[in-house]
Image (cartoon, grey):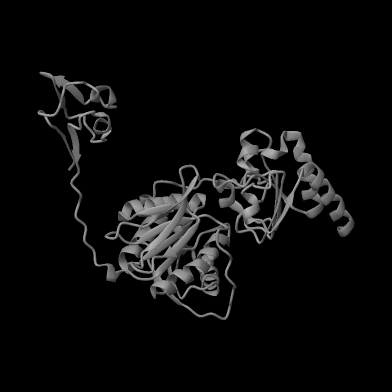
Amino acid sequence: MARLIIDKETCTGCESCIPACPFGALSMKEGIAVVDEKCTFCGACVDVCPVTAITLEKEEKAVTIDLTAYKDVWIFIEHESGKVSSVSFELLGEGRKLADAVGSKLCGMLFGDKEDVDKFTKETIAYGAEKVYVMESPLLKQYRTDSYAKAAVDLIRKYKPEIVLFGATTQGRDFAGTVATTIEAGLTADCTGLDIDPETKYLKQTRPAFGGNIMATILDYPNYRPQMSTVRPKVFAMPPRDDSRKGEVIHETLQMTEDQIRTKIVEFIKGAETVNLMDAEIIVSGGRGIGAPENFKVIRELANVLGAAVGASRAAVDSGWIPYEHQVGQTGRTVRPKIYIACGISGSIQHQAGMKTSDIIVAINKDAEAPIFKIATYGIVGDLFTAVPMLTQEFKKRLGR
């Protein structure tokens, strides 16, 4: 239990702490600050006291677990409409490296009805899983937070994985947060890098922080397990599929009934996605250098010739030149095309977080010192309104369009 302590000898009665308290828990009594039961121990008053008369003591709960009981790297196999999400296979590829680094096995965690489970189990093994922990039930055919969380928590508590990874998708973010809260484990969201610390063997989780201005590497508190992360799609490469692989399948029963689930799926209406950046093999993106919404015409013309998708930087989207669905970067989509052409994009760390794993990066910018050139495979220093139309015409000739 936390305690707020006010040193009567040090307090000068300046009243600086009173307006700083967002809960009105502080008042003055005989020239000395006093605190009442409304205090939530937020520490706001501690920061403003000019004479450091206020201190906040926190009593931490002692947690001791047997870390040796936790082993193996688990990947949540996400699926929807009869298809496994590609991020699950991407995580199996990266999970293989992590499992090798800690000397453990790579496992899948899969939920669904019998038809889906049989098909997806084979795919999970083909992409590298040595074991697949399966819960099969009609209640798990479609994702619902209560049923999936119950299944995952029961498996994790029984088999004690050391690391559990989820895709940073709409489903994965909701699911992982519920599981982490229930089992009282840490969770690092939207990771763009994973590694194993060579000395401690703890999971190092890298993600953009402070609006993407820096990359933070996070390690979980050592006395909590498993170590859990959500990882953005397209950050890691898809591993090779090998249908000759063999693996062990462990079946468990979901201890739950329909009346214990708080939600029901009445109807599923899939929105029409007009921009498919994540699966595009070629993307042509425009940034601040485009200058105006009508100037995206030159970007679209090149994209049409190449059969490419049209992307954009956050600056272009924030300016209202193009809809958010086109945004690439930390606050937009993470993409991994074969070719990424950046036109008038400076290449901030936020934008790089969403496209730097592209196979080939072509940068077109007037500023030779733009950060985008540091990661570009090919660079054109010049006016995009000259360079892009020239590329469009040349590709028309080469491709016969």
Q: Residue 80 is drawn in which quadrant?
A: bottom right
Q: Residue furthest front?
A: 369
- Percent position (x, y) of residue 138? 46, 60
- Image x and y of residue 76, in percent: 46, 62
* Picture quarter with the N terminus: top left
Specify whether 304 is left or right of 139: right
The one of 278 and 191 positioned closer to us in this rendering: 191
Going 57% across and 70% down the picture, which residue do you hit?
239
Seen from the viewer's position, the closer of residues 361 and 336 is: 361
In this figure, what is the number of numbered marks?
A: 0
- Where 317 falls versus 117 (above or below)? above
Q: Residue at x 87, y 50 (%)?
A: 393
Residue 319 vs 171, above or below: the answer is: above
Which sits in the foreground, 66 or 115?
66
In which quadrant of the rendered image does the C terminus lie? bottom right
**Is 380 left or right of 234, judged from the image as shown?**
right
For residue 111, say whether it is visible: yes
Write the residue at 13% across / 29% down. Answer: 10
Q: Quadrant of residue 375?
A: bottom right
Look at the image and tell me whether residue 258 can be seen: no
Place of residue 361 in the rendered image (x, y in percent of width and height, measured from the top left): 68, 56
> In this rendering, is residue 37 above or below 162?
above
Q: Position of residue 7 (x, y in %)?
A: 12, 31
Locate residue 15 relative to residue 309 in the image: left or right.
left
Relative side of 33 to 204, left or right: left
- Closer to the camera, 237 or 44? 44
